[in-house]
Image (cartoon, rainbow, N blue to C red):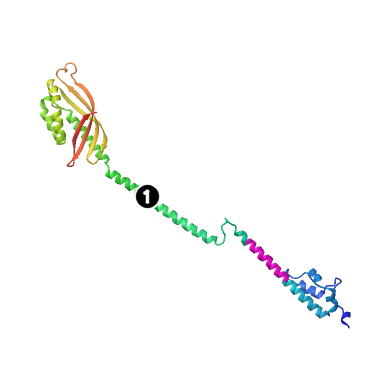
Amino acid sequence: MPKSQRPTSTDEGGIDVAAAADSAGTDSSSVTDRDLDDSRTTEDITSLDGDDFLAVNRSKRDRLRAEAESKGGRRGGRSRGGSDSADRVPGRVATGGGGRGTRIALIILVALSALLAVTTAYFAYAWVQAEDRADAAGPSAATRSEVMRIARDYAATVATYDPARYDDLDRRIREISTPEFAKTYITSSADARRGNASVSGTSRAVANDAGVESLSDGTAVVLVTLDQTVTSPEVSSQVPEGIPYQSRVKVTLERRDGRWLLADLGTV
């Protein structure tokens, strides 16, 4: 039978049924029936026999399918590229490798926290030690109590006298004072002693209160309150119990040869 009269395996639309069936077995990226319709001409169908016609259709179908796959790959590449470019926004931190970076940051923070804790503990310890050294270097409570007791005793000693026994007063003053103060005090009080002796005035003194004004390694200044009772035969009939007299004196002590000595005494 001539080629022009041979029956072809086409449907009413002019599509090769065998080619369409073969095309139906391809994936979603394969050439569609419409693509095949558009690619065929009347000349292709009428001028080729059945085998040649099938071969031409398969060749065109493969070509169109390759073109479609190539277009799909380019679209996918553009999509992926767009995603990458979106990640590269200025001011944004890249998320790639974030897990490792986070772990490193946490390790650094933990190390810094540990260092801060050690440093804080050291400075707290150093502060306490510095305060202890300052306390040790400065006067202790025992030293303060000692100088207040001594100042009270010395003030009461100097303010207790009997005009008939000034020699005993001078002896006691020399025992508790620096040589310089003993000499100055005894000499300067000569006129007062003569006046007191003329009326036979006696004094008994006690010191109950004292406070440290200043205290260093070798010098202490203490304020002392003196309570005196002065008696005299000339007033004993009026005030037989004596005349009370209260005064405040500033006592300066100096430490010499391991002993606190009276270095000055004056009325405040």
Q: Is residue 85 visible?
A: yes
Residue 60 image position (x, y, % from top left): 77, 74
Residue 168 image position (x, y, % from top left): 11, 30
Q: Residue furthest top?
A: 238
- Corner quadrant of residue 173: top left
Q: Quadrant of the N terminus?
A: bottom right
Taking depth in this image into account, of 166 and 190 the one nearest to the observer is 190
Taking depth in this image into account, of 73 and 260 the one nearest to the observer is 73
**Left or right of 60 on screen, residue 228:** left
* Principal secondary structure, stretch drawn in magenta: helix
* Residue for point 12% across, 20% down: 198
Q: Is residue 77 magenta?
A: yes
How many labels, in total? 1
Q: Element at badge 1? A: helix
Mark 1: give few (<14), some (14-19) or many (20+) Cα within 10 Å: few
Tag 1 residue: 123
